[in-house]
Amino acid sequence: MKELQPEIKTAKRQAPRIKMRGKEMIIAREDMMRGLGTNSQEFMDGVLRQLANAVSPGRGADEEAINFGLAVIAGVEPKDELETMLAMQMVAVHMATMTFTRRLAHVETLDQQNSAERALNKLSRTFAMQLEALKRYRTGGEQKVVVQHVNVNEGGQAIVGTVDRGRG
């Protein structure tokens, strides 16, 4: 019997990566700008600084955490700077969510539990709202609703859905 494998969505493009050499970030500029949905050197520099500050746990830039953030951004496949900024916020919220998930699993007092639970709840809702905002931005905020009225007489039948009539 064939085993069912879940379909995994993968990014269509390779995530840009950084390499740390001391305190200096080594990057492939064109790949990085393309991955961040921009043609602006200034935007790319700012994004990398902000991402490093947002995801690095200590004072120094954390190569692994930055590359994780860049991989998430690449998965969003930003088309422009606004989508990149929203993806960066989503990375930060996700990482904070995981931090509070861990804290909730290791609480020692009821106050710690309540605090971690509230933060986790707010962060989870924020992430869902960010995902919805990205969807609205990409579709131009348009929603399509089709309302049809059908009369069905007594003894009749109605079909809801698309009907494909075969030829012949």
Image (cartoon, helix red, strand yellow):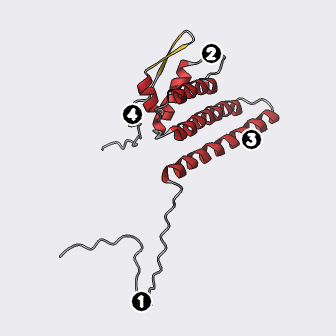
Above-or-below relation of 4 to 33: below
Residue 130, horizontal then vertical, whole percent: 59, 45
Q: Say which amino acid is labelled 4.
A: Arg
Q: Secondary structure at mark 3?
A: helix
Q: Quadrant of the N terminus?
A: top left
Of badges 1 and 2, nearer the viewer stands 2
> Is 117 left or right of 3, judged from the image as shown?
right
Q: Residue at x 37, y 41 (%)?
A: 5
Q: Mark 2 packing: few (<14 Cα in 10 Å), some, or many (20+)?
A: few
Of badges 4 and 1, nearer the viewer stands 4
Q: Mark 3 packing: few (<14 Cα in 10 Å), some, or many (20+)?
A: some
Mark 1 or 2, nearer chain start? 2
Residue 27, horizontal then vertical, whole percent: 46, 19
State the residue in front, 55 or 51.
Answer: 51
Q: CA distance from mark 4 to mark 1?
A: 56 Å
State the residue in front, 155 or 25.
Answer: 25
Residue 128 image label: none
Residue 155 image label: 1
Residue that mark 2 sits on: 60
Q: Mark 1 packing: few (<14 Cα in 10 Å), some, or many (20+)?
A: few
Q: Secondary structure at mark 2?
A: loop
Residue that mark 3 sits on: 118
Mark 4 or 3, nearer chain start? 4
Mark 1 or 3, nearer chain start? 3
Q: Say which amino acid is labelled 1.
A: Gly
Residue that mark 4 sits on: 13
Q: Residue at x 46, y 32 (%)?
A: 39
Q: CA distance from mark 1 to mark 3?
A: 55 Å
Q: CA distance from mark 4 to mark 3?
A: 36 Å
